[in-house]
Amino acid sequence: MPRSNRALHKRRNVTATARPWAPPGPPPQDLAPVWLLDLDDTLHDATARIMPLVNRLMSAFVAAELGVDTPTADAIRHRYWLRYGATLLGMVDQHRVAPQRFLQATHPMAELGPLVRRDPRLIAMLRRLRGRKIILTNAPHHYATEVLLRLGIHGLVDHLIPIEAMQLAGQLRPKPSRSMLRALLARHRLSASRCILVEDSLPNLAAARAVGLRTVFIHGFHRGLGRRPRQLAGPGRRVAMQLASSHQLARLRLRR
């Protein structure tokens, strides 16, 4: 064998020895799933103690801002919920209330922070969950950041997108805005098929599915649903998959 061929043969043998066969590992990061995780009533229980206080504070804000009593404020909030999907959006559009002033007044962390309970099972699940993890919440930034810290998962998520970041043409467009979801995908250079929205809100999940995202309905923190959740997931239904708890996400077999 000529000397040049012997040298090439030797290099090939060295390479084969240095890199023995191994079973394939996980797919590269650019093919891994991207989890868009809601916060309240998805990763932790906000229904029991946090949301009742937030609702009282929202009604008090509307009553003080508009000079009405509490029952009237509640009626106004209900009307804005039906029209806009959120009290905040109605107050901004109808009364030119500054969003940050509303969010600060209705989400005071001195009162809300101590109501958050750390859950070791949630921490363990997020450590096992493969792929990027983005918190996508209609809650304000200061609240979401504090909740993540108190849950012990702030360092386990890659990005936080609070309601302040959900803007199009200078206007708030929170979930379930389909245009906001499309803009989010474009901004972060994500394909819809890679993303999974994990939520407790059926309207938000329906919007995400219409945009092409995969969807997981978390229903365990909602009281009084009875057997109804078992009828919501599957082909042609409003959501693709459903779980009682986000603790089960790391074991989920993803499907459309």
Image (cartoon, rainbow, N blue to C red):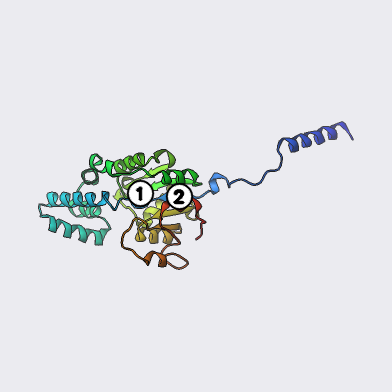
Q: Position of residue 191 (x, y in %)?
A: 49, 52
Q: Nearer the viewer, residue 108 or 30?
A: 108
- Relative to 214, say whether 109 is above or below: above
Q: Which residue is mark 2?
A: 35
The secondary element bearing badge 2 is classed as strand
- Relative to 113, say whether 71 is above or below: below
Q: Nearer the viewer, residue 156 or 207?
A: 156
Q: Quadrant of the N terminus?
A: top right
Amino acid beneath label 2: Trp
Q: Nearer the viewer, residue 83 or 226?
A: 226
Q: Residue at 26% x, 58% y: name it.
A: 84
Q: Position of residue 140 (x, y in %)?
A: 29, 45
The secondary element bearing badge 1 is classed as loop
Q: Residue at 85% x, 33% y: name it.
A: 6
Residues under labels 2 and 1: Cα distance? 16 Å
Going from N to C along the chain, the mark reached first, 2 or 1, is 2
